[in-house]
Image (cartoon, grey):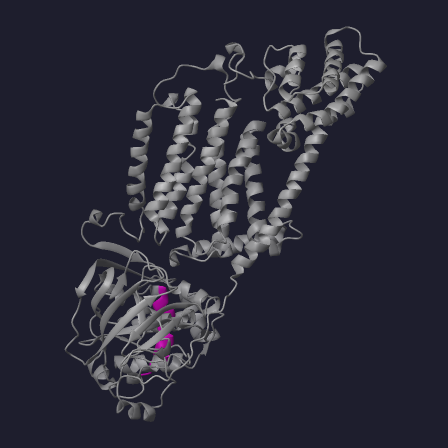
Amino acid sequence: MTKEGEGRLALALGLVAGTCVYAFSRVFSGRAWLIPALAAAWGGIALARWLAHLRIPRVVATFVVAVVGGFAVLLVVFPQTTFYGLPGPESVQHALATLRAANGSIADVTAPIPADPGYLALAMAAAWIAGALSGALIGSPDRTRGARTEERGGLRSLSPSLAAPLPWIALFTVAAGVGQGQGRLFVAALFFTAVLAYLLAESWSGLGRLPKLDGAIRLGALSLAGAILLPNLVPGYRAGPVFPWARIGPLTETTVSPLVQIKPFLLNQPNVPLFNVAADQAAYWRLTSLDHFDGNTWSSQGTYNPAAGVLATPSPAIASQVVHQQYTISGLGGIWVPAAYEVTHVAGLKASIDPTTQTLIVSALHAGTSYDLVSASPEPTGEQLSAAGAGPAPRPEDLALPAATVSLIRPITLQIVGSTTNAYDAAVAIQRYLRSFTYDEHVQADSSTNYLYDFLTRTKAGFCQQFAGAMAVMLRTLGIPARVAVGFLPGTPTIGAPGTTTFLVSGRHAHAWPEAFFQGIGWVPFEPTPRADAPPPSYTVAPAPVTAPTAAASPSPEASQASSAAPSTPQPTPSRAEAPRKVSHPAITAARRASYILLVALLAVLVALLGAREVRLRLPGWTARSATEKAVAAYQEFALRATDAIGERRRSGETEAEYARSVVQALSLPARAAAEVAALTGVYQQATYSLQAPNTAELEAALGANRALRRQLWKAAGRRGKIRLAFSPRPLSPRSGGGTRAGAGAYDRPRSRRAPSAARRV
C-alpha cells in the first residue's frame, strides 16, 4: 500500500465513521452529543493510525488506546470531577457508577433519549473503540515489502483493510435497532454509500487505479440491499420495515417501560408543550399499559395489528361516556399515541393497535402530526365495582409476580386491607393508604421489589412511578389482576370550539397510574398518587356514576354528590397557558463546558507534540561527543525536516548529493540555502566515508548550516509542509533514520514510480 493509498483509506474510513455517528441522531435527542461522539470516532482512528506508524507492540498500543480513550471520556463527560482537566480516583469512581446506572437502565428507555452523562459516555466509548479497531485494520504502508509478497489464494488473498468497516457496521446496526423518528432510509443509504466509497478506495489502493465500473455497480447493489434489509433484521426496530408490504402477519412488539422517561419530563422539561387535544370532556391521555413485572421493572409485550376505522364497541355491562378527541402533536416523540381509554375509532393516523392493552403505536410521532380519535370511557359506580368483584385474569401476566415480591409485599398489603375480601374495598383501601404518603419528584426512579418495600415501610415518598407500581403489585398479591398505565393527566384547559375544550399537555403532566380488572366491567383506573392535579376517581369516594378523572381539586363525598347532578361536560374557565421556558439540560451545560476544556487540552497536546518533536530532532546533536557524531546528527536532523517539508522520503539508492539537489529543487530554495545544503552534505559525507574527521571549522560551518536550514525549510514549505514540520510524529519513532546507510532501510522509500521496483516499499 502506498502512502497515497493509505491517505485515501483513512479519509474514506473517516466518512464511514461520520455517517455511522450521524445515524445516532435517531437515538439521541438534541445535538449536544454529536461533536463529542464525532471527536471520539475520528480520534480513535487517528490514534490507531499513529500507533501503527510507530510500530509499537500491540499490547502497548491497546493500553495506550484504552488510557487515552478513558481520559477523553472523563474530560468531556465528567469535567466537573477533574482537577484542572486531570482526572483522579474520584473521577473514575463517579464515571463507573454513572456508566453502571446507564447500562442498567438501557432496557427501560426508548429513543429518542436525552444525552445524559451515562448514555453520552457509552456512546463516546463505543465510537472510540470502533474507531481504534477500524483504524488498526487499515494496516501501514511500511508493513509489507514487495520482495516478500507471496502468492496467496482464497480468503488469504483478501486484504485485512477490507474488514475495517466491520466495527462501524456493527455499531450502525445498534443505532438502526433502537433509533426512532424519520429519515431511517436516508440514514441507512447514507451510511452504506460511505461503506461503498471505502470499498472503492480500498480497491483503488490495492490495484493502483480505480476499479472497473461493473465492480462498483455490484458493490452499490449490495450496499443498497444492506441499507434496506439489515436494519429490519435487528430486534426491537420499532419503526417496522422500510416498506410496509414487507411485513407479513401481525407485528409483535416488546414495549419497554417508558416510566424512566417520565422523570426527565417532570424535572427537566416540565413546561415543554407536548401536544394539544380538543375533547368534549377531560380524560387521562393514555399511552400504554405494562403488565409484566419481573421484580425490577415493568414492561409489556403485545401483538399489534393495523388500526383503522372502528376498533371496538363499548361493553354493555356499564355505561360509557363517548369522548371525541382531536390531537395536534408539538413536542412529543416516541412510538406511543396518546388516547383516552378505550379507543373505538381512529382517523387520520396510520397506526397499529394491541387489542389487549389498547395501545396505539406508530413508526414515530413528529411535530405537526394530527389525528382524530373516538373513545368510550367506562363510567362504573362504586356499587357496580363492589358487586362485580375481581374476575379471572384476562392473561396470566396480569397476576404474575416473583415469589420474592409476594413474600415481601403481601404481608404489608394484608395489614392495610384488613379482613375485607371484596376486591373493590381492598383497592380503595390501598389507594387511600398510598395517598397519605408524600409526593416527591426528586427520589430515585426505581420500581424494584426492594425499593417498593422501602417505599411502603420507610421512605413513604415518591412520584407516580412508585405509587402506580406499588398499588399494582399490592393488588396482585391479593389475587386481583392489575397493571400500570402510562400517559398524561388531562392538562391545562383553554378556550376551544363550542362544545369542546382544548387541553394543553406539557411535560409536567406526564403520569402513571394503576388499572385493576373487574369481572364484567374490564379495566378500571385508580389514582394512588397524592398530586393536587390528580384527584382520586369519584367512584372510589362516593357510590355515584361519574365521568373519567379530571384535573379539578380532590372532591369530598358531598361535593361529588353535588357534581353528579351537574352536566357531565366540564365548563372550563379561560386561563392563560404558561409560556414555554427554555430549560438548559445538565448534559448540554456539561458538554459545553467540556468543549472548552477539550479545546484547551487539544492545544496543550499540540504544544506538547511540537516540543517533543523538537527535542527528538535535536537530542542526537546534544548527546553527540565526537565531531563525526555531531556532523551525522546534524545531517539526520536536516533529512528528517526536509522529508516533512516535501512530504516524500528520500529514494532508496539516491546518493547524498542527488538528494541535496532534489531537496533544493522540490522546495525551490534560494542560492544561499542551496549552498548551506551542499556544505552540510559535504561535511556529512566526509564524516561518514572518510577516515579523517571534520575539523573544527568545517564542523561549525555544518552546524551553522543546519541551524539556518531550520528556518529556510519552514519558509519554503507549503501549508501542508508547515503542518508536518510542526506536528508530524514521524521523528518520534525510534526507527525513523536520517540519511545514513544504516537508516535508509527504515526511513527511505521511492519518491516516484520511476524509481527501481526492487527498492519500492508497498
Q: Residue at horizontal 24%, vertical 84%? A: 381
Q: Position of residue 422 (x, y in %)?
A: 25, 82
The furthest residue to the top: 691
Tell me the quarter of the picture where residue 689 sits. Answer: top right
Q: Is residue 482 visible?
A: no
Tell me the quarter of the picture where residue 190 sits. Answer: top left
Determine if the magenta segment contains residue 723: no
Determine if the magenta segment contains residue 408: yes
Asked whether 102 or 680 is in front, the reply is 680
Left or right: residue 705 versus residue 260 is right
Q: Is residue 512 visible?
A: yes
Q: Position of residue 150 (x, y in %)?
A: 43, 14
Asked whether 675 or 401 is in front, the reply is 675
Left or right: residue 662 versus residue 561 is right
Asked whether 4 or 177 is in front, the reply is 4
Q: Residue at horizontal 42%, vertical 42%? A: 19
Left or right: residue 325 versus residue 11 is left
Q: Can you say whether 25 is above or below 335 in the image?
A: above
Q: Which residues are magenta?
A: 404-420
Tell me the quarter of the picture where residue 560 sits. Answer: bottom left
Q: Can you say whether 378 is above or below 204 in the image?
A: below
